Amino acid sequence: MGRLDGKVAMVTGGARGQGEAEVRLFAAEGARVVVCDVRDDEGKALAADLGDDVAYNRHDVSSEEEWDAAISFALERFGRLDVLVNNAGIAGGAPIAQHSLADYERLVAVNQVGVFLGIRAAIAPMTEAGGGAIVNISSGAGLRATKYMIGYAATKYAVTGMTAAAALELARYGIRVNSIHPGVIDTPMVAGTTPDAMKSMLKATPLRRMGQPEEIARVALFLASDESSYMTGAHVVVDGGITV
């Protein structure tokens, strides 16, 4: 316990699924945490459940203005920012010929632009704090092609590339940037997958099961903590072996 003592963390998409698991684990390890999401009821309930060291802030990650407001909220509430987990994301797919531009642009706005804005917004407060850790949630689809998922894959490959570029640029400020690449995780986002598609994904996974949100959260904790102090630009795969 206490692996994040004294640190302030922000988790986007933190109201449920992987984000909720990260919030709960970070708080248990001593961090003060800002939960960012657009799911107000779930976000407020999570913050209320965890006490005064966890605060909810409504936050659409695709909005530049709301990133400014979220950073201001974190600084006003807790005085600093040490850790950012860019966890918010949406899924969606279709054959390329049927993939609408509107759906593609929505994926880009949340999954790609949201991460860019988060990295950019974290630079000033983390530099002021003497350094920090940014953890970007990409996907196995950000390392390996997936048919019928051109928009989703494009955004997750972008997160992989942004992680590497930011790691090189921000090292001078003591800011480490790493990415996590989950496989099939038991979250609400995956719950809408058809039984046939789920069966196919699990068959392709050597461990033959879905991962649990807590298994991603534990990796995020390691990358957020000083235990990974010599890691930056790393792409950590947590997918039961599906990309091997």
Image (cartoon, rainbow, N blue to C red):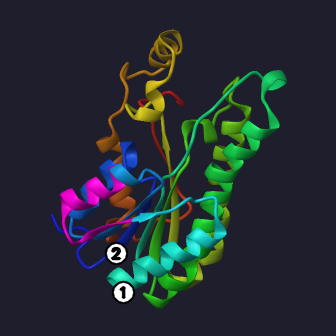
Q: Quick check: is 52 in the magenta stretch?
A: yes
Q: Residue furthest front?
A: 41
Q: What residue is rendered at 57% in x and 60% in y?
A: 61
Q: Is residue 137 visible?
A: yes
Q: Main secondary structure of the magenta part?
A: helix
Q: Position of residue 94 (x, y in %)?
A: 71, 24
**Amino acid type, callout 2:** Val
Q: Which numbered dot is residue 215?
A: none
Q: Residues within 10 Å of mark 2 (few under 14, many from 20)?
A: many
The residue to which callout 2 is attached is 8
Q: Does the magenta-highlighted stretch encompass residue 93?
A: no
Q: Which residue is mark 1?
A: 79
Tell me where residue 130 appears, x and y as whole percent: 44, 88
Going by the numbered disc 1, the residue's amino acid type is Gly
In whole angstroms, how far apart are the C-alphas of marks 2 and 1?
Answer: 8 Å
Name, please, the residue furthest toward the top: 196
Q: Quadrant of the N terminus?
A: bottom left
Q: Where is residue 93 drawn, in percent x and y?
A: 67, 28
The image shows residue 111 at horizontal and vertical percentages of: 62, 49
On the image, which quarter does residue 85 sit in? bottom left
Q: Secondary structure at mark 1?
A: loop
**Residue pictured at 57% horizontal, 79% vertical:** 123
Is mark 2 in CB contact (under 8 Å) with mark 1?
A: yes
For the record, the magenta segment spans 42-56
Residue at horizontal 69%, vertical 45%? 106
Residues 179 and 126: in front is 126
In the picture as drawn, the residue positioned furthest to the right comes out as 97
219 lies left or right of 97: left
